[in-house]
Image (spheres, rainbow, N blue to C red):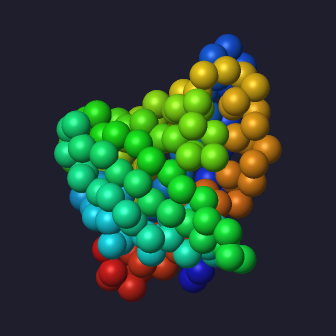
Amino acid sequence: MNTVAETTIEADPKVPVIRTTRDFTATPEQLFRAHTDPELFAQWVGPDSTRTRVVEWDARPGGSWRFVSSHDGQEFAFRGCFHDVRPDRIVQTFTFEGQPDGVALETLRFEDLGDGRTRLHAQSLVDSFADRDAWLASGMETGVNEGYAKLDTMLADGSV
């Protein structure tokens, strides 16, 4: 049986926040590892049409990260700092270097649903409603859905 998990992406009407929720057939530990191990992260993050290389990765409170995604000869770089890194949650900043003034505060939470299933709750707080709406219009949904589908495959084949 091959079912596609549903990702919910919601814009909060009162604050400039994007909330993403997705269930995985995985333990919280596996999802945590997929988000903190740079070799694993580079394999699944982003749309299918991009390739990602991790330039810097120090997944600990106070550590920083940077990765570059390439597509059709163009490169897009992203960077941030880890503020909290625990098995049940990660708090980090996120900046697209093409828009260096736009810094998001992201919180990822891994909810154990039992039976080898985990719900990922992700929240991105941005500077303004205009920035939030630009994120939503940027094709982020494609990147999120295709990236999570790659992660599903990695979880199913034992890569994570």
- Residue 134: image location, x then y, percent: 75, 37
Write down the quadrant of residue 146 in the picture: bottom right
* Residue in the picture at 57% in, 46% down: 96
Residue 13 in percent (x, y) is at 72, 19
* Picture quadrant where residue 125 is located: top right
Task: Locate residue 155 relative to residue 82 in the image: left or right.
Answer: right
Q: Position of residue 12 (x, y in %)?
A: 66, 24
Q: Is residue 45 visible?
A: yes
**Quadrant of image for the N terminus:** bottom right
User: Image quadrant for the C terminus?
Assistant: bottom left
On screen, 159 above or below 62? below
Residue 31 shows in this picture: no
Percent x, y for residue 110?
35, 46
Residue extending farthest right = 137
Badge count: 0
In this rendered view, identify the residue nearer to me: 40 or 11: 40
**Nearer-the-camera pick, 110 or 102:** 102
Q: Is residue 11 left or right of residue 150?
A: right
Can you say whether 102 is above or below 29 in the image?
Answer: above
Identified at 68% across, 52% down, the residue is: 140
User: Which of the pair 73/31 is nearer the observer?
Assistant: 73
In the rendered view, does 136 fall on the left or right side of 116? Answer: right
**Measuring 50% from the left and 70% from the top, which residue is drawn there?**
52
Which residue is at the front of the view, 120 or 68? Answer: 68
Extreme-top residue of the structure: 14
Q: Is residue 130 above or below residue 64?
A: above
Residue at 28% across, 64% down: 37
In the rendered view, tell whether residue 138 sits above or below residue 35.
above
